Image (cartoon, helix red, strand yellow):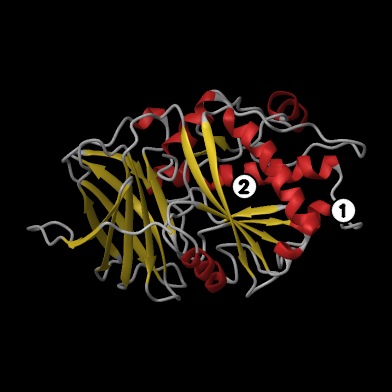
Amino acid sequence: MRAWLIAITVAAGCGTPWIEEIDGDYRRLTTTLDSNKSGQLKASIRPEVGESAMLVTAEPLDDALDCHVRSLQVASDFPFRADQEVASDKARTNAAFIGHTVSLNWPITEDDGFLRPNTSHKVQIGVVDSSLAYTGGDTRVSVVLKRDIDFSGGVLRVNIVFAGSTGADDEIVVATEEAVALWRNIYDNIGIELDITYFDYTAQGIVGAPGQSDLLVYEDISRSVPFGAVNLVVVEEIDGFDQVFGFAGDIPGPMVSSGRSAVAVSAGLHAGADGRFSAAEVQLLGETIAHETGHFIGLFHPVELTFDSWDALDDTPDCTGDFACRESLGANLMYPTPICDGVSCVPQVGLTPQQGAVANRYTGVL
Ligand SMILES: [Zn+2]
């Protein structure tokens, strides 16, 4: 377990009253702000020299309220505006969309440039009620900033959490370890090395998808394991999504504890009816883990299966039909579905340089 080295309260002038914590590689800022009657609140973050990316997470204290990130303002520029993101057919973050917990990693792509040291980065959050009307409400805003100016590679820490009885099932544990070896090879292509620690969480077996249901379970899991890692939760089956191989809490996912702070993967669905993992099923498990964690660290599908929306990257083709997309993107890790012919599946392990650039900007990659 890593420990905080310093904890000081900052109440600097007219800025946001942050509680600041330093943990070697990370600076964490936390505050609770009340939105005004129009549902708006603003938090101001001043990156220090050497800080290269930040992950902002907002969550109303009232479970019945939701929020989204309305804008990011840096000096007089607005490099992120929710209205533009929502109107675009090129996805680059879920931050603009309404959710109980929302996260914005910045910068997202190479085009976003760098954090500007000693310059106020104003994040505007909009808080809404269940009818999507803006409303007042206390909201926790957390910011994690990393010091890592090298966006060409890094280390991603992962907590692999065996939920329920999965950790006592040798078949599942061995398949997971073999899948991790495949995952290491896939991420090696974008310069990301995995630093993995295994945990058991026996309090709960089958749970729903992170961010969708059993939010308290995922919050508890994320509190019970070390900070600074993606939480990969191995479950027997994802409750409510019994035909879904894996589910990421968000794109990007939060580093602070929340009901979204996890990736879930279904061991049972991968093993199939016989409960045993074939080599092909281990391959699929490795690709699912790499794919869902890819979402969590900021990657979208290069194309959705409606073939009318794409990621925001230039080096993943904007194909427009099933056949063309399978041809041009079917071997990409982030293709939306496995491509199988009943005998075998196309290996989906490819990642482009710009996908690597996004992943390396995620604050959890050091
Ligand atoms: Zn996906």
Work out whether residue 243 can be spotted: no
Which amino acid is tagged 2? Glu
- Taking the image as shown, residue 252 lies to the left or right of residue 175, namely left
* Along the line of sight, the residue nearer the viewer: 63 or 272: 272
Whether residue 246 appears in this view of the structure is yes
Q: Position of residue 4 (x, y in %)?
A: 31, 59
Q: Position of residue 339 (x, y in %)?
A: 80, 36
- Quick one: label 1 or label 2, which is nearer the N terminus? 1
Q: Secondary structure at mark 1?
A: loop
Q: Indicate yes or no: mark 1 CB to ligand 1 under 8 Å.
A: no
Please give the name of the residue rendered at 59% of the width and 38% of the height, measured from the top-left corner: 309
**CA separation, marks 1 and 2?**
22 Å
Residue under numbered circle 1? 276
Position of residue 319 relative to residue 340, above or below, is: above
Residues 268 and 66: in front is 268
**Mark 1 burial class by Cα count in 10 Å: few <14, some 14-19, many 20+:** some
Residue type pointed to by label 1: Arg
Query: Nearer the observer, disc 1 or disc 2?
Result: 1
Report the residue marked by disc 2: 292
Seen at 87% across and 58% down, the residue is 275
